Image (tube, grey):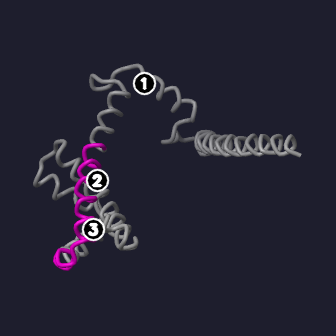
């Protein structure tokens, strides 16, 4: 009986991998067919390249420098920006969430201000970030901060408020 369940779980795993492979193959086939139709049927160059060209150019960018740096260095620079903004959002969001959840008077003062700024999408903060911080790392980090701050704050606040008072006093 147990041998059968091991074979069944292995078959389920293989089946799920085959679904992923089939989905990727279907996407690449539709993509290639679209480009082919644009070029052959409509006799015009497609603005979308073939998947093989994209993959070839991707590997070219990994090993050759663009603007003096490789693709890996560009990705690491972007990850640093995300880490920079998310770190500040994490530190301030957790701290403020704990303070608001445990201090009723502070909660009543700050929640209306947060309710006013929470619905503004992070992309709408870009002009303000450029005006106040310039075009450097600070403005990019600020936009990431705004995008991560409100969910972290709200989840911390709700998690503490919904927990038992016994656990809050610990």
Residue 34, label in figure: none
Query: Which badge, 2 or 1, is on the more N-terminal residue?
Result: 1
Which is in the foreground here, disc 3 or disc 1?
3
Residue closest to the eye, 29 or 46: 29
Horizontal side of residue 3 vs 155, given as left or right? right
Q: Nearer the viewer, residue 96 or 52?
A: 96
* Label 3: how many Cα within 10 Å (few below 14, some 14–19, many 20+): few
Magenta segment: does it hold 107? yes
Residue sitting at 15 percent across and 52 percent down? 130
Q: Which x, y percent locates residue 88?
A: 23, 50
Of tags 3 and 2, the one toward the viewer is 2
Q: Which residues are magenta?
A: 83-109
Looking at the picture, tell me which residue is in the foreground, 94 or 84: 94
Q: CA distance from mark 3 to mark 1?
A: 37 Å
- Secondary structure state at the residue bearing disc 3: loop
How far across and how far down the image is residue 65, in percent? 34, 21
161 relative to 9 in the view: left or right = left
The residue positioned 73% from the left and 42% from the top of the image is 13
Residue at horizontal 59 percent and vertical 39 percent from the top: 39
The secondary structure making up most of the magenta span is helix
The residue that mark 1 highlights is 62
* Dot 1: element: helix
**Residue beneath label 2, please?**
90
Tag of residue 120: 3
Please tell me whether mark 2 sits on a helix, a strand or a loop. Answer: helix
Report the number of numbered marks.
Answer: 3
Q: Quadrant of residue 79?
A: top left
- Distance, label 3 to label 2, CA atoms, is 19 Å
Left or right of 17 in this view: 75: left
Residue at (34%, 62%) from the top-left corner?
Answer: 151
């Amino acid at each position: 009986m147990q041998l059968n369940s091991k074979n069944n779980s292995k078959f389920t795993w293989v089946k799920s991998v085959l679904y992923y492979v089939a989905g990727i193959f279907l996407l690449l086939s539709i993509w290639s067919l679209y480009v082919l139709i644009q070029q052959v049927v409509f006799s015009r160059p497609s603005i979308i390249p073939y998947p093989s060209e994209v993959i070839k150019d991707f590997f070219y960018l990994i090993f050759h420098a663009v603007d003096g740096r490789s693709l890996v260095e560009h990705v690491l620079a972007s990850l640093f920006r995300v880490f920079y903004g998310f770190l500040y959002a994490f530190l301030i969001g957790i701290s403020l969430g704990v303070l608001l959840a445990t201090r009723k008077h502070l909660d009543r003062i700050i929640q209306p201000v947060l309710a006013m700024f929470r619905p503004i999408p992070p992309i709408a903060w870009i002009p303000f970030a450029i005006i106040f911080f310039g075009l450097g790392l600070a403005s990019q980090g600020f936009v990431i901060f705004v995008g991560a701050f409100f969910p972290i704050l709200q989840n911390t606040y709700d998690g503490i408020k919904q927990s038992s008072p016994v656990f809050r006093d610990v």
